[in-house]
Amino acid sequence: MTEGTTYRVLIGGGGTGGHVFPAIAIADALRQLVPGTEFLFVGAKGRLEMEKVPEAGYAIEGLPVAGFQRRVTLKNVTFFYKLLVSMISSRRIIRRFSPHVAIGVGGYASGPVIKAAARRGIPVLIQEQNSCAGVTNRLLARSARTICVAYEGMEKYFPADRLVLTGNPVRDNLVDLSGTAGKAYEEFGLVKGKRVCLLLGGSLGARTLNQSFMDGMGKLDRNNLQVLWQCGKGYFNEVEEKIRSAGLKNIRLLPFISRMDLAYGAADVIVSRAGALTISELCLVGKPVILVPSPNVAEDHQTRNAEALVRKHAAILVTDARAGEQLVDTMLGLVENSVQQAQLSEHIKQLGIPDASRRIADEILKLLEKT
């Protein structure tokens, strides 16, 4: 490109926070490197990205595309029609915006628009968050010049000569948690000197995690323990009533935790689902973690994510099916085992990549400089 020309970057994908927030982080990092860059996001109508991307200050267009259900359902009747409309709309978006590079972050929304960009000869970079590659990214890989991944061993899904290990972008305030513990005690009403178990079920809550801790609530009544419990808005009243009935004073219940940096900073042990973005955050946080993968995700990728950490002795895995009988006891055992805590902490820290956003932005810049 000639000097002074503004880059136009298209970013396609979304559907969940695990796709949307890394996409925004990538755009933020690239904008810092090249302040005049113009961005256009393309997502799925009615999904999270249509709200969060504009809140972050970026333009977005929505496609009617929907995911194909792997079971017999009436939703698949309209799948092909929505896909056709999305493909036509994607070609129009590409012609109108004329991007210099197209970035796919996964999710079914990225398929039509990234494919349309590739057919126009526009350089494509895709970013895969999980240790088990998603279907859309596998299909797009043949068109991609660069494939940014967060896990080793992704050659089984993608061409090895295009792979770059970059990690997953995470929130900047999680890179350095020093000094957050003191603020956390005030923020959440925690008692200094008592160990803290942080229980995370995601912003919507997780039935298995909540139910396991409610069923084992009698075991949580310990003088040296306090539980910081994010239960999700939909479960708050039920869990709150259970805690009140049990008369427990050492549980701090919240429907949602906005200051995750403070929550992570205060935690001695963390219990969580195993989404790709969450795991990337946990690797930077460097605290001992028990992962309970959700079975209700495509291709069981949360279990694959968790197993990748377990193989490195960086996490404990409790299956969703066994959580009811094992989870609370496993957590209590870890809280009392300082040696195991130290080992898990040391190993998970080794997997963290704090500058993932910048690494991906650098790869995008390499493609832009060739246009």
Image (spheres, rainbow, N blue to C red):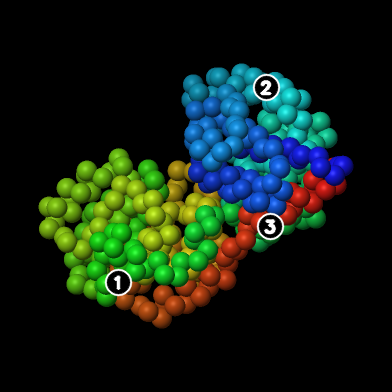
Q: Residue at x 30, y 56 (%)?
A: 229
Pick whichever of labels 3 and 1 is earlier in the sequence.
Answer: 1
User: Is residue 19 or residue 293 the one in the foreground?
Assistant: 19
Q: Residue at x 71, y 42 (%)?
A: 37
Residue 250 vs 148, above or below: the answer is below
Residue type at mark 3 is: Arg
Q: Residue 289's spot in the image, x, y percent?
A: 43, 65
Q: Hey, what amino acid is under mark 1?
A: Arg
Quarter placement of the N terminus:
top right
Could you classify mark 2 by the number of other residues whose Cα lies within 10 Å: few (under 14), some (14-19), or many (20 or more)?
some
Q: Nearer the viewer, residue 258 or 118?
A: 258
| Crowd tier of the residue under label 1, counting other residues whose Cα lies within 10 Å: few below 14, some 14–19, many 20 or above | some
Q: Which mark is residue 195?
A: 1
Dot 3: element? helix
Q: Secondary structure at mark 1?
A: strand
Task: Tell whether 289 sits left or right of 152.
Answer: left
Describe residue 168's horizontal placement relative to residue 193 as left or right. Answer: right
Mark 3: few/some/many CA within 10 Å (<14, 14-19, 20+): many
Q: Where in the figure is residue 211, as x and y percent of width and height? A: 28, 50
- Mark 3, mark 2: which one is toward the viewer? 3
Q: Is residue 225 left or right of residue 352?
A: left
- Residue 215 seen in the figure: yes
Earlier sequence position, callout 1 versus callout 2: 2
Q: In the figure, 211 relative to 194: above or below?
A: above
Asked if residue 210 can be seen in this view, the reply is no
Q: Nearer the viewer, mark 3 or mark 1?
A: 3
* Element type where label 2 sits in the image: helix
- Which amino acid, mark 2? Ser
Task: Please name the residue that numbered disc 3 is placed on.
Answer: 359
Instruction: Give the residue pinned by disc 2.
Output: 89
Q: Residue at x 58, y 44 (%)?
A: 24
Q: Spatial distance from mark 3 to mark 2, Cα to Cα?
A: 31 Å
